[in-house]
Image: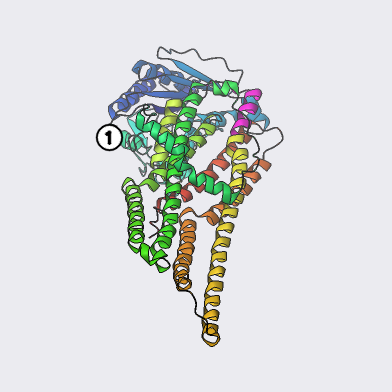
Amino acid sequence: MSFQDVQIAFAGHNRPEDLDDSAAARASLDHAFRLLAEAGVRSGRLITGVADGADLLAAAAWNATGLGPTHAVYPFLRDPAADFPADHGRAETWLDGDSFEAGGRSAYLAQSRWLVESADILLAVWGGDAARGPGGTADAVRLAMERGVAILWIQPPDYDGLKLITPPDVDDFFSFNELLQQIERGVDYITAAATPERIAAALERQGFGRHAEADDAPPRTLLSRLDDLAHATVWRTYALFHRVAGGARAPAEAAPEAPQDLAEQPGFVLLSRACEHADRLANRLAAVYRTQQLYLLTGAVAATVVGTSPAIWPQVHLPAVLAELGLAMIALAVWSSAARARRHERWSNARRLAEQLRLERAAWALGVTAIDPQGADTLGPAACRARACRRRAGLASGRFDGSRVGRWGDWAIGELVISQASYHRDQGLRNHRVAHRMHSLENGVFVAFIAIMASFAAVSLLSAPLGLEMPEWVGGALIITSAVVPAIGAAVLALEANLAFSERSRESAFLAARLDRIRGRLPAAPRLHDYQRAASAAIRLHNTEQDQWAENAARRPLIKGA
């Protein structure tokens, strides 16, 4: 297998006494990059702090491979651009370390997080000791373990072979301190000699090649134009039903527009294009699925009316049978087509991909990731495709001064928190109305059915003593009513079971409240780490909600209604 756009974070000692032998360190770095190439890495990006010492050696060694550019991340705005070869292109990011330290945080630990968040593998020149200060190489190793990222380990001073630290599964509860203890005792629990095969297996755990990437928009054809026409007419039925039964949308709190300098970043453009394409596909699949379900259940009620109509008009018995048969065949064709295409799963996957890309786009602006190593979809289609898109996007470049952090952070929180809280409040209210009105219809029809049955029984009991005779059509109407009322009740129950209006209403109310709480915890003048903390909390909430929604949607194929 070959691996494209691999994100390789680098962390290493910068003290001469830690490196001991620069020539040996450079030889080990050359060996490490050769192993990556032998493992199948065909292109990638080295993400490094380019500090004096191992960082510059790694940048030079990576540049010699010709596999891709280097992205330098500096901890302070005042740091000058590093002087190192960059024949294959480079990008640079400056963090506001003074702002971190003013908030009692480590600028170098923030830099390490920025390096590791987007990494597929960490290359570390590390002595195997605990950190002597925040933000060192040991912290980078710890952060990589927490994110489930493998570490290609070069250990000075002897540089005797390369090792691969493969983090165990997240439910193994193996900690960084236990790793330090294992190293001290010389026990290899999660550490082994680095080989191309083991490195390839570690990269495969990051989702490479597991699922095909999202397709580009297909060319315009006659069929695509007919599909557009169908979506503008037939497939808008469910949207019309939801608007009538749920009421008009509430005025939404407007989220800020993407700042101009953010919108011009190539990585943001790439993520936005992928997000828009995925969202458009998901909306179309949702419209088809929901409208077909509405048609199937409405058709079941209509078939019941048609099938029982000869009870009043005996002369239309054959046409009624043929009409009912036709409706049944149409319903069967729609259901079987959706079942063969597994449309409910396609809709679930498309919606999950669109949401994951939306989260990744906002996370990208703040230097965090939307991939939850403990999430249910860590290696699912959506997560793998979104991660592939994030790899191509690279990292945001430029200076993250106070002005940029405020503008980009406000936009990201607007995307992840403000607009989503507003959306879920609206959806919760409208789905509650839909569920309430559907149950009101069900109750009203049932009450009417009881009234009709009671009236018929009363009239039947009084007709004989009074010498009256009921018309034949009254009995026929009673037969139709006896069949249609249960059919309407069953259709309402099936629609609620399949589209879960009540459940979605409760979930939306819960999400809106949690998002409002996240927004309320932001300080009046947020720093980058405040935005990152709020964004990560919102992303975890959205990922949990998407895990549940996707699991439920995948279990809800169309109901034939017959």
What amino acid type is highlighted by mark number 1? Glu
What residue lies at 53% left-to-right and 54% top-to-bottom?
Answer: 501
The answer to whether any part of residue 152 appears in the image is no
What residue lies at 60% left-to-right and 24% top-to-bottom?
Answer: 259
142 in relation to 429, above or below? above
Q: Where are the magenta residues, as a range?
A: 396-413
Total marks drawn?
1
Quadrant in the picture for residue 352: top left
Q: Residue 52, position in %: x, y?
A: 50, 19
Q: Give neighbour class at mark 1: few <14, some 14-19, many 20+ (Cα, 10 Å).
A: some
Q: Is residue 407 left or right of residue 174?
A: right
Quadrant in the picture for the N terminus: top left
Indicate whether residue 408 is drawn in magenta: yes
What residue lies at 36% left-to-right and 43% top-to-bottom?
Answer: 187
Indicate whether residue 376 is drawn in magenta: no
Secondary structure of the residue carrying numbered label 1: helix
Work out which residue is located at the far front of the displayed protein and give it: 467
Q: Residue 43, position in %: x, y?
A: 35, 23
Considering depth in this image, is 481 or 376 the residue closer to the camera? Answer: 481
Considering depth in this image, is 313 or 268 the residue closer to the camera? Answer: 313
The residue to which callout 1 is attached is: 197
Q: Residue 272, position in %: x, y?
A: 49, 28
Q: Residue 173, position in %: x, y?
A: 45, 49
Considering depth in this image, is 466 or 364 the residue closer to the camera? Answer: 466
174 in relation to 149, above or below? below
Work out which residue is located at the far bottom of the displayed protein and give it: 465
The answer to whether any part of residue 459 appears in the image is yes
Dominant SS type (magenta): helix
